[in-house]
Amino acid sequence: MDRLHHLPQLRRLHCLGQHNQALVTAYLKHLQARQYAPATLQTTIDGLNSFCRLVPACRPPHLSQDLASTTADAIEAGRYAAHQAGRAPSTITTLLQGLHRFFAFLQDHGWMTQQPVTWHRQQVWVPHTLPKPIPEDDRLGLFRVIDRRRDRTMCRLRLRCGLRVGEVSTLTWSAINVEAGSIRINHGQGQVDRVVYESTDVAHAWRHGRRCPPSEATYRCPSALKPGLPLGVRAIQHGMARYLHAAGITTPYAPHSLRHTFATQRLNAGAPWEVVQALMGHQSIRMTRRYTQLDETTKRQP
């Protein structure tokens, strides 16, 4: 369990008080013992940090020092603040689910007497929208304004390899097999490991993107502001919004839309559902069918 202390994600706990850091570390050890992926640990930390930032004005003064004192009112305030900040319903639901699991752990260990997340009061309705692949004209316009090699590479990884935003964020050099032209994704969402294959432009980016030895460049896309940590998902999202604005594209595509585009292109090219499922890292073929959509020309084929 000592290796937990070497996880770079723990450095994200700096905004929590000492007692809270102890509570969260105990929970992370619990998750790690149950074989949860490192990405889940990172999501847990980010969610708790986000919750503490969302309710600074209305939370109890001692909440920043003791998360075990969280009340249902504080959760409600956090949910409302997230909505006011423009967070998507699915994002708010994911945050609440993570908080519910964390507080259940504190309850089980006697650090908390009552679960503050009550679904009948705080549940958020999440619409089931269709995936949104990016049409070719918008896609060309987007890539035309991306002026940083790192950002182009991250977009290509989602568009050409179908990687999730979090998988791009935490991608390490050791996962890239330049000779074989492949990328290994370990402990993906749902604990699904997979191997994806590079396109020509992604392989070209590998050859020209490495500037220092592995010991100094563990992450393919490191954070410029936080040495030793990967570029955060939020930073990738902000970058996408900035490039869309620069390209004059008014449709609010998310970074994930490039992954939607990857799946749609494979299906339109005639790839079997099972192949697309493997490339996307889905546990179930039903998820692949819901997650992707065919364009109108394919739908109209007999």
Image (cartoon, grey):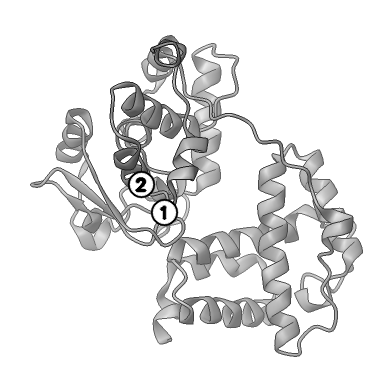
Q: Amino acid at mark 2?
A: Cys
Taking the image as drawn, is residue 57 in sight? no
Residue 230: numbered disc = 1
> Within 10 angstroms of label 2, few (less than 14), some, or many (20 or more) residues?
many
The first of marks 2 and 1 along the sequence is 2
Taking the image as drawn, is residue 160 in sight? yes
Quarter of the image for residue 187 reads bottom left
The image position of residue 263, as x and y in percent, is 38, 32
266 shown above or below 162: above
The one of 32 and 207 positioned closer to us in this rendering: 32
* Residue that appears at 36% across and 43% down: 277
The image position of residue 123, as x and y in percent, is 81, 52
* Residue that appears at 19% across and 40% down: 206
Q: Is residue 215 left or right of residue 258?
A: left
The image position of residue 238, as x and y in percent, is 55, 35
27 shown above or below 242: below
Q: Is residue 95 left or right of residue 283?
A: right
Q: Amino acid at mark 1?
A: Pro
Secondary element at tag 2: loop
Quarter of the image for residue 85 reads top right
Quadrant the C terminus occupies = top left
The one of 77 and 37 positioned closer to us in this rendering: 37
* Residue that appears at 33% across and 52% down: 171
What residue is disc 2 on?
Answer: 221
The image position of residue 57, as x and y in percent, is 87, 55
Farthest residue toward the front?
302
Quarter of the image for residue 159 reads top left
Q: Is residue 253 left or right of residue 117?
A: left
Q: What is the C-alpha distance between the residues marked 2 and 1?
A: 6 Å
